[in-house]
Amino acid sequence: MANMPNSEPCASPLELFNSIATQGELVRSLKAGNASKDEIDSAVKMLLSLKMSYKAAMGEDYKADCPPGNPAPTSNHGPDATEAEEDFVDPWTVQTSSAKGIDYDKLIVRFGSSKIDKELINRIERATGQRPHRFLRRGIFFSHRDMNQVLDAYENKKPFYLYTGRGPSSEAMHVGHLIPFIFTKWLQDVFNVPLVIQMTDDEKYLWKDLTLDQAYGYAVENAKDIIACGFDINKTFIFSDLDYMGMSSGFYKNVVKIQKHVTFNQVKGIFGFTDSDSIGKISFPAIQAAPSFSNSFPQIFQDRTDIQCLIPCAIDQDPYFRMTRDVAPRIGYPKPALLHSTFFPALQGAQTKMSASDPNSSIFLTDTAKQIKTKVNKHAFSGGRDTIEEHRQFGGNCDVDVSFMYLTFFLEDDDKLEQIRKDYTSGAMLTGELKKVLIEVLQPLIAEHQARRKEVTDEIAKEFMTPRELSFDFQ
């Protein structure tokens, strides 16, 4: 979008391209979900209008696999073309027809982000003097926006801060919810920077069938699980939107500034909102955007507006921050940088992410050792063969095996992981043996989390959630 201060914002070709992709997905999901004819017609009309705008801007028709600025691919045909069409990613839904999961290389192209390559990982290692986290080494955090800029600043002794969040939709979190927090804690430790964690209880109230009290209660309970990841209380502020918005003039002022610079058409294009969505949903993206700007936290950063923000999050949250990055220069703030993670697959397979509402799709942080064992043995999708004889002969498929996928997230030892991959692929290791390894990794991990969680009292949670100065030197 144009960054000219006095002109009406107009969508850039890439923004239009992304909007068309999102809107196309919306149309497909409405048709698949047997939505009303009016709703489908309205979504189709919006899609055609976006495609006309794109043609007017580019002088050529929209092509799904050819973002502006990229040379046209040699072929639009073959299984990959349809597969990309069937990957559906937005902040609320993640679905693919492939048992391997989402095609993240295609997602990078579609979202217009950059791949985290070996060079960037080496640079992070040089800057921090620490071995890169396993999530970086294994491509679990795989995509970024402006991470090199953050490292430039850090190397020049300029400060930055971290921002991540959680939408508290139930009392218990599952292991997939831990991924951004495990990584964010590592970033906080190695860069020694302040962190703000947004609990979007207002969002969950708007989207789910919850009362305000329930949504706030879940925020506090989830905050305790987050605190149990080991964050430093002197450098971490966790806040509930319902609570903080009313007490921080800086935060609400930024929400309003963002709201003024984003049109209804833009949020419809980015998020797929329809005319029947509540105005609360339509205005919510500005609230998720506001923590990206340092003066939303005057108690931490005073009135400074120049401190860049780095946001570790799953890539389904990226639409919020594409919007934020577009608005930032027009309201005089630095664009936030991002680090994107892949999705943590459901036990049933990588076609969807885990769901807090389906107890068998995930391992919850409240599960007992016995429940963990039962869930893995009974529900974890296997890449093994139908019979032991076949498996010994042809080997298993680690690309679709959920137990192996989980080990890539939680097993620290790279050599051991590689050995398991070889043994399973060759048929030397059976599915039952692979599941046993995973159970032995998960049981102590969850038990240790539960022990730390028990230590987090209401008073400790309240201290983390009280607006205050953080110990950090901004010279």
Image (cartoon, rainbow, N blue to C red):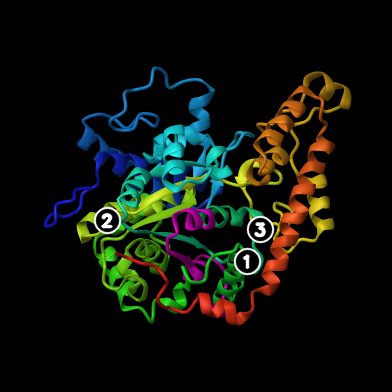
Q: Position of residue 179 (x, y in %)?
A: 58, 52
Task: Describe the element under mark 2 as helix, strand or loop.
Answer: loop
Question: Image quadrant of residue 309?
Answer: bottom left
- Picture quarter containing residue 408? top right
Left or right: 281, with 456 as reference point = left
Q: CA distance from mark 1 to mark 3?
A: 13 Å
User: Label 3, on which residue?
Assistant: 174
- Give percent across and percent down for residue 271: 40, 53
Q: Foreground: 468 or 62?
A: 468
Q: How many marks?
A: 3
Instruction: Please give the label number shown on residue 280.
Output: none
Extreme front residue here? 129
Q: In the image, what residue occupies the spot 20% across and 53% down? A: 9
Task: Say which residue label 2 marks.
Answer: 334
Q: CA distance from mark 2 to mark 1?
A: 32 Å
Lower sequence index among marks 2 and 3 = 3
Going by the numbered disc 2, the residue's amino acid type is Pro
The percent position of residue 242, horizontal first and vertical second, equals 46, 76
Query: Which residue is the site of mark 1?
Result: 228
Regarding residue 58, the answer to whether it shows in the image is yes
Q: Which one is closest to the eye, mark 1 or mark 3?
A: 1
Label 2 CA crowd tier, 10 Å (few <14, some 14–19, many 20+): some
User: Label 1 crowding class (10 Å Cα cut-off): few <14, some 14-19, many 20+?
Assistant: some
Q: Pointers 1 and 3 in contact (CB under 8 A)? A: no
The boundaries of the magenta stretch are 185-213
Label 2 to label 3, Cα distance in Å?
34 Å
Q: In the image, what residue occupies the spot 76% across and 22% down?
A: 426
